[in-house]
Image: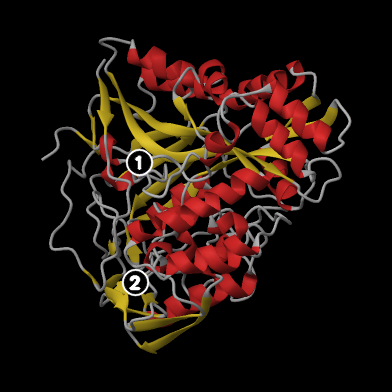
């Protein structure tokens, strides 16, 4: 078997203003043949807390977005290479003022949804107003908190008025939070029910049940993407072991989320198996979040002591078999604004330093805490990771930690509602800019539902960076924000991930099928020789 290491650009050097339509299609393999079957350990269950797993007004996790990016359309999207947004449902977009407060897009002509309804600027206006009106707790509306109003000024023109300058606004329009929904079908003030999904993207959701989802080529799609297949079946597995078995048996063509650390080594050594493993750098991060109102976790000295004890290198070695990398900041390595703030402040793990921190704050030892994690969302290694964390903290004698595993369907709403002292979360960026690793966590009505407030980050540093069209100029401000987080520890970064896909060797486009946000771009997959 061959292992292919792919280096794709993930850095945001600047924005294109205006953004014009691309000059040609992105080419790939044949669109003929049977459905390409992609395995995943993700599941999409309708529940009381998740009544509409694919509704753009509510869905804010990498699994749902993986389906939505392939079925909904946005005005802008990221190209195969490069990190400046290009057009999709729009033919042209750009800021129309020097202050970066007014953004306008002209839509492509003659676009329709998968149900045959016409798509125009009124649908774009409806979609963004709906997102903000519903303002689902823990949902993606936080990305557009700076949007004052949106208006369809013509049938094919929409204008966004921002409260404050925001040079990252085009990036946000690439996300499923800005997915265009059919104003004749979706309710304006409430979520859809069940797994309904009507979009104008490259695929339409043909069917879904507990075992699989079928995405068929959308004949109405007229955006800028080139499809290299006509149908995708996403097959759901309970664990990565079952998914690997299906790949080796030829029952699936691609092994997607999640390839476990043990499988990386095993698949890499499986010579002549007809399987190829593709490795890419990624921007996924894993971290601990704290309820800063909790009587114990709310004490800064407790959080700082944990930061002084956690050994990231051992977590990477013992739980992830070195398939991840230690992370000492909320902003991952690879982005220009990254700074190793936690290492700069705390250095190597030190029991003596942690004990001194607790003693000076008058905190009795051992400190009792419960660390909660999800058992079925981030992969099989998560439980092992929390065992390693528990051992590190308890072996110091300074903590008395227990861990608790919870299913994702219960874990996500409980975390958002502030029911845990300390919990483990992953973050897959919405777009490749340091803003997306700072603002969603520390703005008002933040993604975590965290009570932690730092006015310097919220009111000064984030607004300052959003006035900078040249994103490399934001390094100093984002560096200061990272230093503040390292001092206060409202979240504790642990590691940064690499990305892996395994596929049968007759599948093409695998190296393009994951973007820097770890979202599958299913249109890139083909069967046979690429052209």
Image point 30% across, 73% down: which residue? 111
Q: Is residue 425 visible?
A: yes
Using residue 162 as the reference point, say whether residue 16 is left or right of it: left
**Image: 261 above or below 148:** above
SS at circle 2 = strand
Instruction: Tell me the quadrant of the picture where the N terminus can be found.
Output: top left
Q: Quadrant of residue 360?
A: top right
Residue 79 place in picture, x, y as percent:
26, 54
Residue 289 place in picture, x, y as percent:
67, 43
Comparing 110 with 394, the one in front is: 394
Query: Which residue is the site of mark 2?
Result: 112
Q: Earlier in the sequence, mark 1 or mark 2?
A: 2
Residue 468 place in picture, x, y as percent:
38, 67
Image point 58% across, 53% down: which residue? 53
Q: Is residue 184 visible?
A: no
Q: Quadrant of residue 445?
A: bottom right
Q: Quadrant of residue 373?
A: top right
Image point 48% across, 51% down: which residue? 479
Q: What color scheme is it?
A: secondary structure
SS at circle 1 = loop
**In the orientation shown, which residue stands out farthest toward the bottom?**
153
Query: Which residue is the site of mark 1?
Result: 514
Image point 80% across, 33% down: which residue? 358
Residue 498 place in picture, x, y as percent:
41, 31
């Amino acid at each position: 078997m061959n292992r292919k290491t792919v280096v794709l650009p993930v850095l945001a050097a600047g924005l294109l203003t205006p953004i014009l339509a691309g000059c040609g299609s992105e080419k790939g393999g044949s669109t003929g043949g049977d459905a390409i079957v992609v395995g995943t350990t993700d599941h999409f269950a309708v529940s009381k807390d998740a009544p509409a797993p694919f509704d753009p007004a509510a869905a804010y996790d990498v699994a749902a977005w993986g389906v939505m990016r392939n079925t909904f359309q946005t005005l802008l999207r990221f190209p195969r290479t490069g990190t400046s947004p290009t057009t999709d449902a729009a033919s042209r977009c750009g800021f129309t003022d020097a202050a970066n407060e007014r953004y306008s897009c002209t839509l492509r002509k003659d676009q329709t949804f998968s149900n045959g309804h016409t798509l125009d600027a009124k649908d774009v206006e409806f979609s963004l107003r709906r997102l903000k009106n519903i303002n689902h707790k823990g949902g993606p509306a936080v990305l557009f908190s700076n949007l004052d109003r949106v208006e369809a000024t013509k049938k094919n023109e929409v204008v966004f008025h921002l409260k404050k300058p925001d040079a990252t606004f085009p990036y946000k329009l690439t996300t499923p939070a800005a997915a265009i929904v059919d104003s004749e079908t979706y309710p304006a003030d409430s979520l859809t029910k069940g797994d309904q999904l009507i979009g104008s993207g490259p695929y339409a959701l043909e069917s879904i049940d507990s075992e699989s989802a079928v995405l068929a080529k959308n004949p109405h799609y007229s955006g800028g993407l080139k499809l290299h297949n006509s149908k995708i079946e996403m097959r759901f597995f309970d664990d990565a072991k079952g998914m690997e078995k299906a790949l080796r048996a030829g029952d699936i063509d691609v092994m997607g989320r999640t390839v476990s650390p043990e499988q990386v080594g095993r698949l890499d050594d499986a010579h002549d198996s007809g399987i190829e493993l593709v490795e890419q750098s990624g921007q996924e991060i894993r971290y601990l979040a704290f309820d800063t109102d909790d009587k114990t976790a709310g004490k800064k000295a407790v959080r700082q002591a944990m930061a002084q004890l956690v050994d990231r290198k051992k977590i990477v070695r013992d739980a992830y078999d070195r398939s991840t990398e230690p992370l000492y900041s909320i902003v991952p390595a690879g982005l220009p604004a990254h700074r190793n703030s936690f290492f700069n402040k705390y250095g190597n793990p030190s029991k003596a330093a942690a004990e001194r921190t607790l003693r000076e704050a008058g905190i009795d030892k051992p400190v009792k805490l419960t660390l909660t994690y999800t058992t079925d969302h981030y992969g099989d290694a998560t439980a092992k990771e929390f065992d390693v964390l528990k051992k590190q903290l308890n072996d110091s004698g300074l903590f008395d930690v227990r861990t608790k595993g919870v299913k994702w369907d219960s874990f996500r709403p409980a975390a958002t509602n502030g029911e845990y002292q300390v919990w483990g979360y992953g973050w897959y960026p919405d777009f490749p800019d340091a803003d997306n690793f700072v603002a969603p966590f520390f703005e008002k009505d933040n993604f975590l539902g965290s009570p932690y407030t730092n006015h310097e980050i919220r009111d000064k540093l984030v607004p300052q960076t959003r006035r900078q069209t040249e994103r490399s100029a934001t390094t100093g401000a984002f560096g200061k924000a990272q230093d503040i987080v390292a001092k206060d520890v409202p979240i504790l970064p642990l590691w940064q991930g690499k990305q892996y896909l395994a596929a049968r060797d007759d599948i093409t486009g695998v190296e393009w099928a994951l973007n820097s946000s770890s979202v599958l771009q299913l249109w890139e997959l083909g069967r046979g020789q690429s052209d």
